[in-house]
Image (cartoon, grey):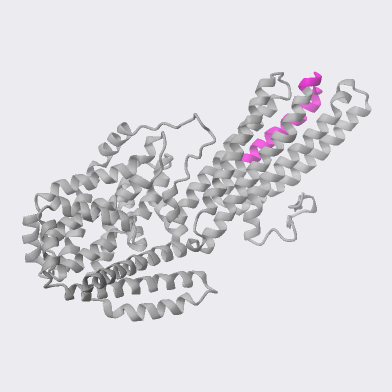
């Protein structure tokens, strides 16, 4: 019975340690997630900046996996070179050892104060950042409390023969020790928690130092498993370059060190007699040495990974999402970046539909029109995938900034899909009617429509850029473009009726069709403006009473058109 209670207590203390680690990670992500991602993106210009950025971001997040997902998001689409992305991972693996170093000292007495301060900050719901930092403080307090309880529990079993027998059997095979630690780290999603547990075992003499070092090597392997298994899958092997590269560096390091455990143990004993501190020092030294060895070799290493894992985009099913990584949902800022990239694919499809519709003003190929209408199915599928992905993110993990960005992505994707519906259900059937009746637009009418199509294409690209940059001046320009577009539609209608009064037979045959197309184009443009301009202007308080203020009355913009 005592053994059962002991196992339950052990599981409970480990669970509290994991939960505290989780609270720290989510609190930091909510408070500083977008800022950290932006900082990491700027640092990816060269390998040294990327390495130190990886250390800093991971030390703050306490998760090399989260840092790796951010770097993968930049590297998978070719936004940055693989070399700095690999440097980020080397830095991340060093950064994750810093919190272990801090907690290797006796700081358990700070636990009650951290929890008290954290609760007081957490109750300040009026200030979201203070609220999130309170969550971080409570998480740190839980981690320290869990470590203290683990040490107390280990003290009770220092003389246990049964435990000594089990641990001795494991210690007889270092490879088995590494395997168990790797599995535990993969299951816990936290190398920090596992290394802290190993420190607790070593500090109480329940495992020898060489066995503890073997367990640390296993934890370093385990932390590389999650991005590899749970990352993006599919025909494009290039998205696996970074997680595979990280795993291979871990494997090379473990193979090189496994035969040196005995001299490493003697050296550690000479440097620090505290076994717990020795474990922390070995963990840090392993990752620092690995970084020193691999940093000069990153260029040929990246070239090898590129050759072994070539880029291959699966075009067989364009309705399948490419960037919605399920594993990224644990890190909201990374998941939102993936969803934004997927939403931009709708822009490409819509642009293709607009280009084909413009050609159909004069072409007579009915099969081309049918193919254009089939593209709307791609828009529908991608929009559904983006919505499903975003709504599956735990809302409790989102800070105010992340929640606002999530809504912006949903709004953008929805409006792109609605613009495609206008093309599919209205504009393209009108063009098909022209073919069935053998009608032709006048030169003037066709030129007017072609200019509006070109304007739509330009506005679509502006909306895509604005969706990513959130630039206020660009938002105002796009919003005012709606007024200009409305004016162009009105002038085109007046000119068309003028030609109709002049008795042109060719114009009379296409009069109704021409006006229908003008209305369709204006409606599509309204969706483009609503997709990207209005969210930016509304956030800055410039979209008031369904109207954006403008220098002149002629430039007034309404959002209910």
> Is 68 within the magenta?
no
Quadrant in the rendering for residue 365: top right
* Closer to us: 482 or 98: 98
Image quarter in which the N terminus is found: bottom left
Where's residue 521, x and y in %? 74, 37
Q: Using residue 86 as the reference point, say whether residue 456 is left or right of it.
A: right
Task: List the single residue furthest toward the front.
Answer: 1
Relative height, residue 556 to residue 377 (above, below): below
Q: Give the percent coordinates (x, y) of residue 372.
A: 65, 28
| Span highlighted in magenta in the image | 435-460
Q: Position of residue 95 (x, y in %)?
A: 29, 59
* Residue at x-position 23% and y-position 50%: 291
For residue 373, say whether it is visible. yes
Task: Determine whether, in the image, residue 65 is placed left or right of residue 180.
Answer: right
Q: Is residue 471 visible?
A: no
Q: Looking at the image, which is closer to me, 188 or 160?
A: 160
Residue 307's x, y, as percent? 31, 31
Residue that appears at 66% across and 32% down: 354
């Amino acid at each position: 019975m005592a053994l059962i209670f002991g196992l339950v207590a052990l599981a409970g203390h480990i669970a509290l340690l994991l939960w505290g680690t989780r609270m720290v990670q989510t609190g930091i992500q909510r408070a500083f997630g977008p800022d950290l991602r932006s900082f990491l993106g700027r640092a990816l210009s060269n390998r040294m900046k990327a390495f130190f950025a990886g250390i800093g971001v991971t030390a703050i997040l306490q998760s090399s996996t989260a840092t790796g997902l951010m770097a993968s998001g930049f590297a998978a689409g070719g936004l940055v070179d693989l070399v700095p992305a690999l440097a980020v991972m080397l830095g991340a693996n060093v950064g994750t050892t810093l919190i272990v170093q801090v907690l290797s000292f006796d700081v358990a007495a700070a636990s009650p104060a951290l929890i008290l301060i954290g609760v007081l900050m957490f109750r300040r719901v009026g200030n979201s950042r203070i609220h999130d930092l309170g969550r971080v403080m409570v998480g740190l307090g839980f981690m320290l409390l869990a470590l203290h309880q683990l040490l107390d529990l280990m003290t009770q079993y220092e003389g246990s023969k049964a435990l000594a027998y089990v641990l001795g059997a494991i210690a007889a095979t270092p490879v088995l020790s590494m395997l168990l630690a790797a599995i535990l780290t993969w299951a816990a999603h936290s190398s920090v928690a596992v290394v802290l547990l190993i420190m607790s075992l070593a500090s109480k003499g329940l495992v020898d130092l060489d066995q503890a070092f073997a367990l640390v090597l296993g934890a370093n392997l385990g932390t590389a498993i999650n991005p590899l298994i749970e990352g993006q899958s599919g025909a494009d092997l290039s998205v696996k370059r970074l997680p595979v590269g990280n795993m291979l560096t871990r494997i090379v390091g473990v193979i090189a060190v496994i035969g040196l455990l005995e001299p490493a143990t003697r050296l550690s004993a000479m440097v620090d007699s505290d076994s717990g501190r020795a474990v922390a020092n070995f963990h840090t030294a392993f990752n620092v040495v690995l970084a020193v060895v691999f940093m000069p070799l990153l260029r040929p290493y990246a070239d090898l990974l590129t050759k072994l894992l070539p880029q291959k985009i699966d075009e067989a099913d364009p309705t399948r999402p490419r960037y919605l990584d399920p594993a990224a949902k644990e890190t909201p800022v990374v998941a939102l970046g993936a969803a934004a990239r997927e939403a931009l694919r709708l822009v490409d499809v819509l642009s293709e539909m607009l280009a084909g519709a413009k050609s159909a003003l004069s072409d007579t190929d009915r099969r081309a029109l049918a193919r254009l209408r089939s593209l709307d199915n791609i828009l529908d599928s991608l929009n559904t995938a983006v919505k499903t992905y975003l709504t599956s993110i735990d809302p409790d993990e989102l800070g105010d900034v992340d929640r606002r960005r999530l809504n912006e992505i949903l709004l953008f994707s929805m409006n792109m899909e609605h613009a495609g519906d206008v093309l599919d259900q209205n504009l393209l059937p009108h063009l098909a009617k022209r073919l069935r009746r053998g009608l032709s637009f006048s030169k003037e009418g066709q030129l007017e429509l072609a200019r509006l199509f070109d304007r739509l294409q330009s506005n679509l690209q502006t909306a895509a850029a604005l969706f990513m940059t959130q630039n206020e001046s660009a938002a105002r320009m796009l919003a005012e473009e709606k007024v200009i577009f409305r004016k162009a539609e009105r002038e085109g209608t007046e000119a068309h009726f003028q030609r109709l009064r002049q008795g042109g037979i060719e114009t009379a045959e296409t009069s109704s069709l021409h006006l229908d197309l003008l209305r369709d184009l204006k409606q599509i443009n309204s969706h483009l403006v609503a997709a990207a301009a209005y969210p930016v202007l509304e956030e800055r308080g410039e979209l008031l009473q369904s109207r954006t203020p403008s220098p002149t009355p002629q430039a007034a913009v309404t959002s209910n058109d």
